[in-house]
Amino acid sequence: MNVGTVVKLSFFVSICFVILGALMKITHLPGAEALLIIGILGNAVFIVSALNEVWTSIRIEKGEKIMWTIAFFFIGTLGPIIYILLGRKRVI
């Protein structure tokens, strides 16, 4: 499995598990914590694979690589969504 597939798959899996876990937590259903943990682990896999994709890219400058790194860690869910929808086409 290549890095691009891991980036997309881990992003969508983590978002789905976090949303489902949050909804279950709100309604006090059992198993919500496990889904949230799976979502967080999926997000960690996404961040590592996306940072690998960004930092090995030869199409963007170092300043933009730093910007994506900051976005992944400090902007929360919005940074990865922007990366998947808009920024990834420039990087790869």
Image: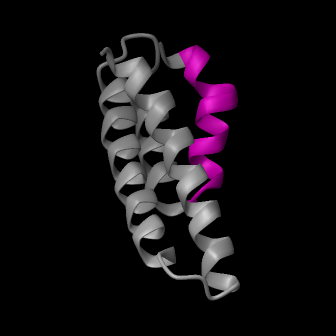
Residue extending farthest bottom: 28
Q: Can residue 87 be found in the magenta stretch?
A: yes
Residue extending farthest front: 30
Question: Tag count in the figure?
Answer: 0
Q: Quadrant of the N terminus?
A: top left
Q: Which residues are magenta?
A: 75-90
Residue 39 versus residue 65 in the image, above or below: below
- In the visual, does 58 lie left or right of 27? left
Identity of the residue drawn at 41% across and 61% down: 40
Coordinates of residue 45 in the picture (x, y in percent) = 33, 44
Depth check: 46 or 9 in front?
A: 9
Coordinates of residue 82 in the picture (x, y in percent) = 66, 39
Coordinates of residue 10 in the picture (x, y in percent) = 44, 38
Residue 17 sits in quarter = bottom right
Residue 67 versus residue 54 in the image, above or below: below
Residue 57 versus residue 84 in the image, above or below: above
Depth check: 39 or 48 in front?
A: 39
Identity of the residue drawn at 40% across and 70% down: 34
Instruction: Please tell me whether the stretch drawn in magenta is mainly helix, strand or loop.
Output: helix
Coordinates of residue 18 in the picture (x, y in percent) = 56, 62
Color encoding of the figure: one colour
Q: Can residue 16 be found in the magenta stretch?
A: no
